[in-house]
Image (cartoon, rainbow, N blue to C red):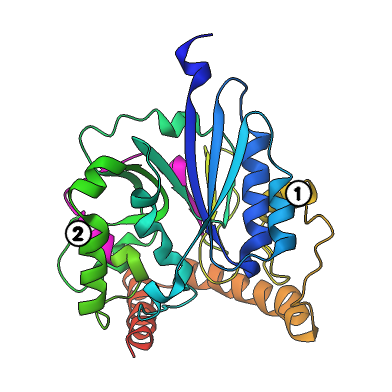
Amino acid sequence: MNEEKKIIIPIVLAADHFYAMPLAVTITSMIANKKFGHIYKIYILDGGLNIDDKQKLKNFCSDEVLIEFLNIIKNDFKLFPEKRHLKIAAYYRLIVPKMIDYEKIIYLDSDIILNFDLIDLYKIDLRGRIIAAVREISEEYVKKYFFRPITKYFNTGVLLIDTKKWKDQKICERTFDFINNNINKIKYADQDALNHILEDDWLEIDSSFNFQLDKHQVMNADSRINVLHFVGPLKPWHYSYNNGYKQWFLKYLQASPYSNYKYPDKNIKTILQKFFLEPVFIFVKKIVKKIAPKFLMKLLKNIFWYFSNRRDSR
């Protein structure tokens, strides 16, 4: 047996009870696209999973898929700010390299679908950098409202991390200190803090490894997608989510331990939103984009981001 067949790929995800189903769907897609010959060692940061959640997740275990639950001390994060749809669990990734003793680890958010074998991400040469990541899809606007000038900005939903460098350079401690001392500056939870600290120490990788999907983005059959990341507060497990890429999520949902999932948010309001308000919004948006000058569209986007960020900072 050659060395590649023996490789163990450590993968870390985080979830509480409310994210147990999306987490299971992510893992389902992960295993469905895994090749034979190497081992996935999956660590789940337990932010409040119940016994039933854990039992369902343990059903994924096999000779080549190992799952371990890691307890999180929530009080360590109680003073950290929750921003937009980003909850306390978003900060858990900061402590991962201190908890797991591997040369490299992969961190994944639990709102993604995998369309490839993670060994292809794991084998990327970090070239001496602490992490590898993909640029934020809304980088232009995020940088505009960042608390200081910054050259480029990454999304933390998919990370390849050099654990030794992370620990040697005390990234966890520095990030904790920065967040505690700059709560009013942070708009995107730990993502802002990590971009501040790692500005010159991250490797940009191809966007296919973290294809960030806006809910109004049109499907493109020519796009190469290794990781489909459902960004924003509205997710494909919400009834009113209407993007064509939702079928990717539903495919793996049906193959997951939560195949009997029913939309808890299905009501008159969300039905109207899905079949009337959203189509009208998309139609009007297309018309406006055709007739409005580019400078006006840019101005409207900037106004939206300005007021959105002001609301977050309160």
Residue at the spot of label 1:
256
Residue 264 position (above or below residue 165): below
Q: Which mark is residue 265?
A: none
Tell me the magenta residue range.
193-213
Per the image, is 211 magenta?
yes
Identity of the residue drawn at 61% across and 25% down: 35
Q: Quadrant of the C terminus?
A: bottom left
Residue 301 position (above or below residue 22): below
Q: Is residue 261 left or right of residue 208?
A: right
Which picture quadrant has residue 100? top left
Residue situated in front as seen by the camera: 170 or 194: 170
- Residue 212 at x, y percent in the picture: 48, 54
Residue situated in front as seen by the camera: 23 or 289: 23
Which picture quadrant has residue 311? bottom left
Identity of the residue drawn at 53% across and 17% down: 5
- Of callouts 1 and 2, which one flags the residue occurring earlier in the amino acid sequence? 2
How far, Cα to Cα, is label 1 from label 2?
Answer: 38 Å
Residue at the spot of label 2:
197
Per the image, is 209 magenta?
yes
Identity of the residue drawn at 69% across and 51% down: 57
Count neighbours of disc 2 (C-alpha within 10 A) and say few if under 14, some if 14 to 19, many if 20 or more: some
- Residue 175 at x, y percent in the picture: 25, 64
Q: Is residue 249 left or right of residue 193?
A: right
Residue type beneath disc 2: Ile
Q: Secondary structure at mark 1?
A: loop
Q: Secondary structure at mark 2?
A: helix
Count neighbours of disc 1 (C-alpha within 10 A) and say few if under 14, some if 14 to 19, many if 20 or more: many
Q: Is residue 62 left or right of residue 300?
A: right
- Residue 64 at x, y percent in the picture: 62, 29
Residue 93 position (above or below residue 64): below
- Residue 129 at x, y percent in the picture: 22, 40
